[in-house]
Amino acid sequence: NEAPPEPHLKRGFCRDLVEPNDSQGVPKRLDVKSAPDGEGTCVPGLKSVAVASLEEVSRVLEQGQKHRHVGCTNMNEHSSRSHMVLTVTVKSTPLRPDCPSTFGKMHLIDLAGSERIGPSG
């Protein structure tokens, strides 16, 4: 199982919530690009994390949540101020060598500011 990166999209660029800084400690500035194969989009330089258990998935999610922008509104004390995309890619390994492996991908998206503007303040 693989829990790929959680990109944070904002004004046309994204932040890596798993590994927000480069090796010198400078915040990475990542851009959303068209995928080289022409199928969808990609974010070059985004950290991908391989996981093997639900506990490891939870650890990666918690790490990403720590780097996410949040703020206080009248309706929600910890309202997200950023969108978050989590892509889960699963590859199965067959038990028999004559069987092909299978592959699946799922995108989970949490949109920022889903509270109503008026009551939320």
Image: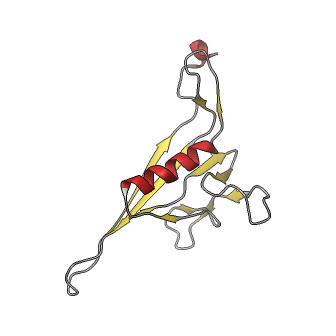
Q: Of 70 and 31, which appears nearest the observer?
A: 70
- The quarter of the displayed image where residue 103 is located: bottom left
Q: Of 2 and 63, which appears nearest the observer?
A: 63
Q: Of 60 and 34, which appears nearest the observer?
A: 60
User: Would you place residue 69 above or below residue 85 in this image?
Assistant: above
Count of residue discs: 0
User: Would you place residue 90 above or below residue 11 in this image?
Assistant: below
The answer to whether 116 appears left or right of 108 in the picture is right
Q: Of 109 and 93, which appears nearest the observer?
A: 93
Which colour scheme appears in the figure?
Answer: secondary structure
- The quarter of the displayed image where residue 51 is located: bottom left
Residue 39 in picture, x, y percent from top left? 49, 66
Q: Indicate the quadrant containing the C terminus: top left, top right, bottom left or bottom right.
A: top right
- Farthest residue to the bottom: give it: 98
Q: Residue at x 64, y 58 (%)?
A: 19
The answer to whether 113 appears left or right of 109 in the picture is right
- The quarter of the displayed image where residue 105 is located: bottom left
Q: Indicate the quadrant containing the N terminus: top left, top right, bottom left or bottom right.
A: bottom left
Q: Residue at x 57, y 48 (%)?
A: 64
Q: Residue at x 58, y 28 (%)?
A: 79
Residue 22 in picture, x, y percent from top left? 74, 63
Residue 70 in picture, x, y percent from top left? 64, 33
Residue 99 in picture, x, y percent from top left? 21, 82
User: Would you place residue 53 above or below residue 96 in this image?
Assistant: above
